[in-house]
Image (tube, rainbow, N blue to C red):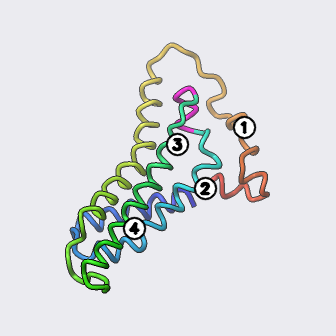
Amino acid sequence: PHCAMGVCLDVLMVFALIFGSINLYHRSKIMFPIAFIFAIHILPVADGMPNSLANGAPINQTLAICIMIACCVGWYGMRQDFVRNGGEPPMDKPAGKLILYAWLAIGVLVNIAPIGEWGMILSSLGSKKEITGRDMPHPESGTDFYSRLNIPWIGKC
């Protein structure tokens, strides 16, 4: 689910870049709920990467909360566009600024953690510090929230 939702959000971002802000209101009906669920599902396993690479800094938790805030701003923007259009969904009209800002924030926040992880991994490649157990699972693997619910395959996706 993690990769599938992330790719889905990225595909929606590509559509927004290709088609612009026309009908962004309708695409937001898909984008904001998926992004919100994406952020919520990160929280139970948020102590993994990149937190573990950054000495336990709450990177994932911060990003998840920021994504949820961006979704709320987007929903508020959708409400404003709905009211501004006389109680009708704005068909074939450019989206309001709050919706655009929410899309931009979600796009950046969803992709900044993986890009940061790659940066941290690449920066450690030239270090003289010996990394043992490269091909071994993380010591806490199998003890996460999803494993305790007896659905560990969700945490591994």
First in sequence: mark 2 or mark 1?
1
The residues colored magenta run: 49-55
In 3D space, how far apart are the residues under numbered discs 3 and 2 (Cα atoms)?
17 Å
**In screen coordinates, is 64 left or right of 104?**
right
In this rendering, the label closer to the viewer, 4 or 2: 4
Badge 2 element: loop
Of 125 and 98, nearer the camera is 98
Q: Which mark is residue 13?
A: none
In 3D space, how far apart are the residues under numbered discs 2 and 1 (Cα atoms)?
16 Å
Percent across and percent down for residue 84 are 25, 77
In 3D space, how far apart are the residues under numbered discs 4 and 2 (Cα atoms)?
28 Å
x 71%, y 41%: residue: 141
Residue position marked by numbered label 3 in the rendering? 60
Residue position marked by numbered label 4 in the rendering? 75
Percent across and percent down for residue 54 are 52, 28
First in sequence: mark 4 or mark 1?
4
First in sequence: mark 4 or mark 3?
3
x 34%, y 52%: residue: 105
